[in-house]
Amino acid sequence: MRPEPIDPAVKAAIDAAFRADMARFGYRLIDVELGLDHDGDSGIWVDLHYEDSDIPVDPKAMADLVPRISAIVCKLDEDGFPHIRHDFREDRPVLKTLMVSVVAKRRLTRSSGDAGSDVRPR
């Protein structure tokens, strides 16, 4: 099946969300098409293109876009899950982030000298 064009209003809303969040990483333009995924379900295929830059991209910023775009798609009554592909230079730097859960943060805080802490390493 060939990809179908998407409603221009939906594309503009998705573009605005990406532009707001990803401009600092050199976001340049977007391609959006409707299609079917490997299970035959409706999908929205979103390709983001970036300027050639050495500014490190942030994986968390990229991941945070999925629920935002899903909300936009739902609000505009478009059918399909957004599949997002970030197209930037293969050797572009990527920020390394430390993902620590709230529980782990609490454990670190308690075990770092809190009097009466009953937290023990596992």
Image (cartoon, rainbow, N blue to C red):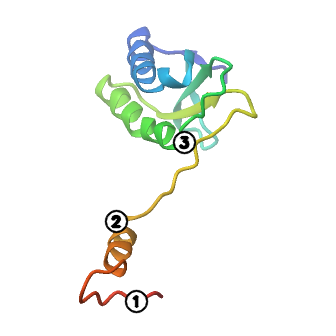
Coordinates of residue 34 in the picture (x, y in percent) = 54, 23
Whether residue 7 appears in this view of the structure is: yes
Residue that carries the numbered disc 3 in the rendered image:
59
Q: Image check: 118 left or right of 59?
A: left
**Label 2 sits on what residue type?**
Val
Who comes first in sequence, dot 3 or dot 1? Answer: 3
**Label 3 sits on what residue type?**
Pro
Who comes first in sequence, dot 2 or dot 3? Answer: 3
Q: Nearer the viewer, mark 3 or mark 1?
A: 1
Q: Residues within 10 Å of mark 3 (few under 14, many from 20)?
A: few
Are the residues tagged 2 and 3 within 8 Å (C-beta)?
no
Are the residues tagged 3 and 1 within 8 Å (C-beta)?
no
Compared with 23, 60 (above or below) is: below
> Count of labels shown?
3
Compared with 40, 20 (above or below) is: above
The numbered disc on residue 102 is: 2
The secondary element bearing badge 3 is classed as helix
At horizontal 28% and vertical 87% (from top left) the residue drawn is 117
Q: Residues within 10 Å of mark 1 (few under 14, many from 20)?
A: few
At horizontal 53% and vertical 38% (from top left) the residue drawn is 58
**Label 1 sits on what residue type?**
Arg
The secondary element bearing badge 1 is classed as loop
Residue that carries the numbered disc 1 in the rendered image:
120
Coordinates of residue 76 in the picture (x, y in percent) = 32, 22
Compared with 18, 103 (above or below) is: below
